[in-house]
Image (cartoon, rainbow, N blue to C red):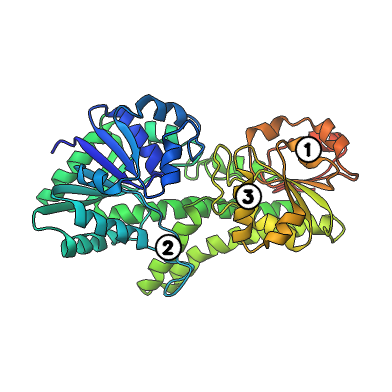
Amino acid sequence: MTIQSICCIGAGYVGGPTMAMIATKCPDIQVTVADINDKRVAAWNSDELPIYEPGLDAVVASTRGRNLHFTSDVRSAIAAADMIFVSVNTPTKTYGLGAGRAADLRYVESAARLIAEVCRGHTIIVEKSTLPVRTAAAIRTIIAANSSSEATFEVLSNPEFLAEGTAIDDLENPDRVLIGGDLTPGGQVAMEALVSIYANWVPRERIITTNLWSSELSKLVANAFLAQRISSINSISALCEATGADVDEVARAIGTDSRIGPKFLKASVGFGGSCFQKDILNLVYLCESFGLPHVSEYWRQVVHLNDWQKSRFVEKIVRTLFNTVNGKRIAILGFAFKKDTNDTRESPAIQVCRDLLREHARLAIYDPQVEPDVIRQVLIQSGVSAELIASNVEIHPDPYSAVKEAHALVVLTEWDEFKTLDLARIHQLMLKPAFVFDGRAVLPTAALKAHGFDAFTIGKGE
């Protein structure tokens, strides 16, 4: 089966970049990204894209208007497509059965109902959102109950493995592409159609095909294993601080073991992003649902330790600043959950800032990519009142204005520009003693002390 037209429902962090790459590598395929959010669609059609990702601007500009299109006319885009990617939001439920753990699939269900209503002929539906195991069966059930007799469908799973900040590189040169489908003749034909698209630039040996359930579960398990490594090294960072060891040296030593490897062993104030916590909690709920409480509790502890690391960091700040931050100006450098993205979802900065504000600290925040209105809105969503934000939060255009007359500097995102800060200038601008709390271990510890800072770096013994 030859695919001539693709529609992606959802113009977010996954849908936009993925479709831009497919359009670039497959010039003979018309690719349309459809979203009901008019403002987001307008941004994709402008010079100010709605997400920041290194290299994304150039990829979009090279194909937009040729074979890459962004539209809010979702129905027309679906009707014209041979293959439909479902890349809608799947947040963790905040209510009812499974609250705080299970995925909220209302957007997936709405997309499935719309596909069933609009499509005629044969269509391949590709799950691109991070979904619980056996969601494909739910999609198929909804479509079968609501579609025209003229329509036939195959459902595939094609989970994304993108890391924000390196998404374009991840798309262009992926470790693997995973495609799951039914082990039926129709399922095999559908899988081969999707394999053929990726094969335009991905070596065939990196394209893995499985059954649907294995594909869906592999996404959750991959993120759970990565998050587990971060929580593991973060637990050791506390031990390093207590014993005088250096967590970076420990990580380097164990990372040379070929059985372990060096990746995801960087200690920090905690992991964030849209996937890790959500996917682990989804895995927790899945294990609970299948009567596996010990497995469920094992994975729950990965999240608990991540939350503890952030709380521990705040406690260190408060204790060091003579057990009170009331009325004290604290410069926050970085609000995104990691460098090279403007995504704040589950960012450790949210909890750290929230807890400091509850201690009545005055925060001066700088992030090179996160918009001030987004910072304020995220803090409100975390439970901080608008009144407290108005009185105790300032958003600054550069790090030097943020640190002026600050009692402490706190690094919460590992932006490269922080590695080359003028430490002498910062020390001069701050109140004395000048405290630094580096939650990402990006500032040179020896240089900080040489410039007269009282410095704490996560995972470093004093």
Q: SS class of the residue under badge 1? A: helix
Please rate how many residues cluster around mark 3, counting C-alpha atoms within 10 Å: few if below 14, some from 14 to 19, many from 20: many
Q: SS class of the residue under badge 3? A: helix
Mark pair 1, 2: CA separation = 41 Å
Please rate how many residues cluster around mark 1, counting C-alpha atoms within 10 Å: few if below 14, some from 14 to 19, many from 20: some
Please rate how many residues cluster around mark 2, counting C-alpha atoms within 10 Å: few if below 14, some from 14 to 19, many from 20: many
Q: Amino acid at mark 3?
A: Ile
- Quarter occupied by residue 42: top left
Residue 433 or residue 124, whichever sits in front: 124
Q: Amino acid at mark 1?
A: Ser
**Which mark lies nearer to you, 1 or 2?**
1
Residue annotated with mark 2: 282
Residue 417 screen position, x and y as percent: 67, 32
Is 178 placed left or right of 393 in the picture?
left
Residue 451 screen position, x and y as percent: 86, 34
Mark pair 3, 1: CA separation = 17 Å
Q: Amino acid at mark 2?
A: Asn
Q: Residue at x 31, y 44 (%)?
A: 8
Q: Residue at x 15, y 35 (%)?
A: 2
Residue annotated with mark 3: 375
Is 117 placed left or right of 71 in the picture?
left
Judge whether residue 355 can be spotted in this image.
no
Residue 145 or residue 233, whichever sits in front: 145
